[in-house]
Image (cartoon, rainbow, N blue to C red):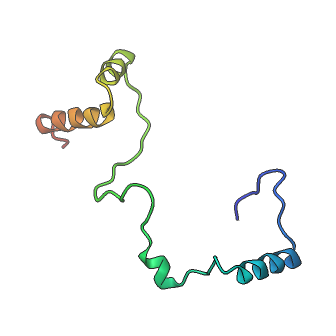
Amino acid sequence: MPKLKPGTVVPTREEDEAINRGIAADPDTYELSAADLKQMKRMGRPKAEVTKERISIRLSPDVLESFRATGAGWQTRVDAALRDWLKTHAPS
């Protein structure tokens, strides 16, 4: 279980039961069934079919500055440049 932030107040069992009774008595709320949850749309971007590995790499400042100056997608362009280099320098 993750560590709670300082000042977080966790309700007691009695308070939790009172909260649940209040929810059950409210006509505007209801508990979602498994079928309801299955129909809901997931938030965020869809999971990519081809994922890239996150690494740490040291580049010369001028090389990095040049790629960053090309704007958004510069990391993809670094990846493309490395792929292009591999076409003529196949690893043995």
27 w.r.t. 92: above or below: below
Give the left or right position of residue 51, taking residue 55 as reference: left
21 w.r.t. 71: above or below: below
47 w.r.t. 68: above or below: below
Residue 19 picture location, percent across and down: 79, 75
Q: What residue appears at the point 44 percent right and 72 percent down from the top-left corner?
A: 40
Seen as rendered, the residue at the extreme top is 62
28 w.r.t. 48: above or below: below
Q: Observer-nearest residue: 55 or 14?
A: 14
Q: In which quarter of the image is residue 90?
A: top left
Q: Observer-nearest residue: 40 or 9?
A: 40
Label count reads 0
Give the left or right position of residue 10, taking residue 34 as reference: right
Q: In which quarter of the image is residue 78?
A: top left
Residue 69 picture location, percent across and down: 32, 20
Seen as rendered, the residue at the extreme front is 27
Q: What residue appears at the point 74 percent right and 57 percent down from the top-left corner?
A: 3
Q: What residue appears at the point 43 percent right and 65 percent down from the top-left corner?
A: 42
Q: Observer-nearest residue: 30 or 41?
A: 30
- Quadrant of the snapshot with the N terminus: bottom right
Q: Observer-nearest residue: 46 or 22?
A: 22
Residue 22 picture location, percent across and down: 77, 78
Give the left or right position of residue 4, taking residue 74 as reference: right
Seen as rendered, the residue at the extreme left is 88
Q: What residue appears at the point 28 percent right and 23 percent down from the top-left corner?
A: 70
- Quadrant of the snapshot with the C terminus: top left
